[in-house]
Amino acid sequence: MNGNHDAFTLGPLETGPACCVPHPLIQVRNLSLQYDGKTALDTITLDIYQGCITALIGPSGCGKTSFLSTINRLTDLIPRCNVTGQILIGGQDIHHPNCDVQTLRRRIGMVFQKPVPFPLSIRRNLSLPLNEHGVTRKDEVAAIIEQVLYDVGLWDEVHDRLDASALSLSGGQQQRLCIARALALNPEILLMDEPCSALDPMASGVVEDLICRLQGRYTIVIVTHNLAQARRIANYAAFFWVRERAGQLVEFGRSQQIFESPRHELTAAYVNGSRG
Amino acid sequence: MPEIIIPVSVRQKIRDFSLQSLMYLAVLLVSAVFVWLLADLVQGGMAHLSWAFLTESPRDAGRAGGIASILVSTLLILLIALIAAVPLAWATAVLLAEFVPIDSRFGRIVRFSLYVLAGVPSIVFGLFGNAFFSIYLGLGFSILSGGLTLACMLLPILTSTAEAGMRAVPDAYRLSAAALGMTRTAALIHLIFPAATPALAAGLLIGIGRALAETAALLFTSGYVDRMPGSLLDSGRALALHIFDLSMNVPGGDMPAYAAALVLVSLLLGINSLAMMFAHGLQRRRILT
């Protein structure tokens, strides 16, 4: 099945350079994470390749979301959460004292499961983070807003009501606005935590197409429970499993290999739907 | 004898109906108390109320003249209380809601102290204010020491309402803001405070109500001199204290007492609606719902 789906053939909407020579942008080394002393992630070692979409799959509670939030150090905000091990982004250790977390998070956009538009106007949703990062020239901000809204396919839908509340948008539009908000800061990496799971199938399809279109230009790490979706959009897949309540990386590889000839029997059982 | 079986749906309808009637009755009773009180005040005080009553100072222990000096003292005491209490209370609330984990020992201790403070009878605050502000700090019987004593009383209510308001703002906003590389301060100013505005306003209103109604705590601190205050270090009589004095200690003071009470209640209603409008406007401007 899906024989014509080659993981390295980019879709017709692709705009960036082709993803042919894997270059590890994020290098995760022996990453462990404890909440309150209980291990939630157990020594993960993984490379995430530049310009590719890497899907994190696995059952609930296996630490995919936790893994995602270690990359932009959102775990710093969780009390009694302890991260050990190394994450290098472009060769730089993100836990190094010289690494400024605000700058790091500017380089790494994040999209959450439920769309979280701020209760502000559509325009302000996009301009607020820009202003906070020192982009204050009005024409520059306006140009970026138009560009990112265009990129996520919202421009035609909202250009005449940018000052309306972002909460008046539909769920799918809200999620695309959140993606636009992340893109406005011109990140290199996009972390997506089940960005389609709270959306209806139509909106989900639109967002999925959008993610495909972003491939190449951004390095995307996406958590998804939707195996068909992972199969459709991902270049690489990492399969997590939970052992004694600790999430472990069982298998990582090209998405085609993970789905069609998994090496590990747990992976095989999961992608075939017999486990998990 | 055959048993009469009432079908379930009918029984449920009866239950629904009785429950609803009870609720309406409760609402009616609550409103009736308010209407009765207001009607009584209007009936008793309206005749005595005039422009002169609001603009003249009291004469003959308040039997004649008006309440101008009393109003000025009251508003000054209220202003001092708010200026002192609001920044302290909201800063504490920010710390408790945003920077301290909800189950931390520090947060629990602060919250517990605030609960205890909220339950302290106002007469005790009066004695404390008298001992600390009037005597120890040497402020004497003054509007300043009355205002500061009131500020202590307002701290718990202002803090807990503001903290609850900020905690009610979804964590998703904080996470999203952080993920966008915004600092906590930026998130606080641009997202959390605006979203918590209704709670902040509600706390402020309750606080103002408390402060305007306060009698016992002011008896020992701002005193009961009914002259127009010349400075914040002068003694000044608050409106509630004036009403108490007129109705308890001054024979023939019932009519001015009624009128003064009517003014107090109108003041309360006026300030409430103003603050509501202001908060609503502020939120509309900052945040779109």
Image (cartoon, coloured by chain):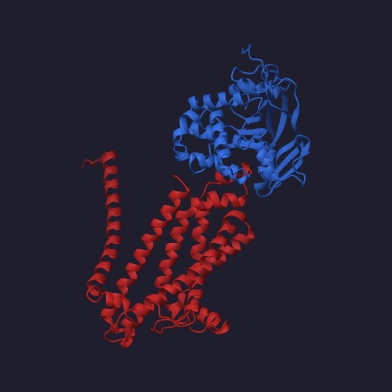
Chain colours: A blue, B red
| Above-or-below relation of A20 to A89 | above
User: Is residue A80 found left or right of A200 in the rendered image?
Assistant: right
Count of numbered tags: 0
Location of residue A121 in the rendering, given as x and y in whole percent from the top left corner: 48, 41
Say above or below: A206 vs A29. Answer: above
Q: Position of residue A117 (x, y in %)?
A: 52, 40
Residue placed most toward the observer, B53 or B218: B53
Residue A66 point in image, percent of width and height: 66, 38
**Residue B234 in sight here:** yes
Quarter where residue B240 is shown: bottom left
Image quadrant assignment for residue B63: bottom left
Name the quadrant of the N terminus of chain A: top right
**Horizontal side of residue B118 vs A273, given as left or right:** left
Image quarter of residue A179:
top right
Picture coordinates of residue B78, whole percent (x, y): 44, 71
Residue B96 vs residue B280: left or right?
right
Would you say residue A62 is visible in this rendering?
Answer: no
At 56% from the left edge and 62% from the top edge, which residue is drawn? B111
Left or right placement of residue A224 versus residue A198 in this view: right
Q: Quadrant of the C terminus of chain A?
A: top right
Rendered position, B162 above or below A204: below
User: A184 and A250: which one is in front?
Assistant: A184
Residue B92 lies, with reference to residue B55, above or below; the image says: above
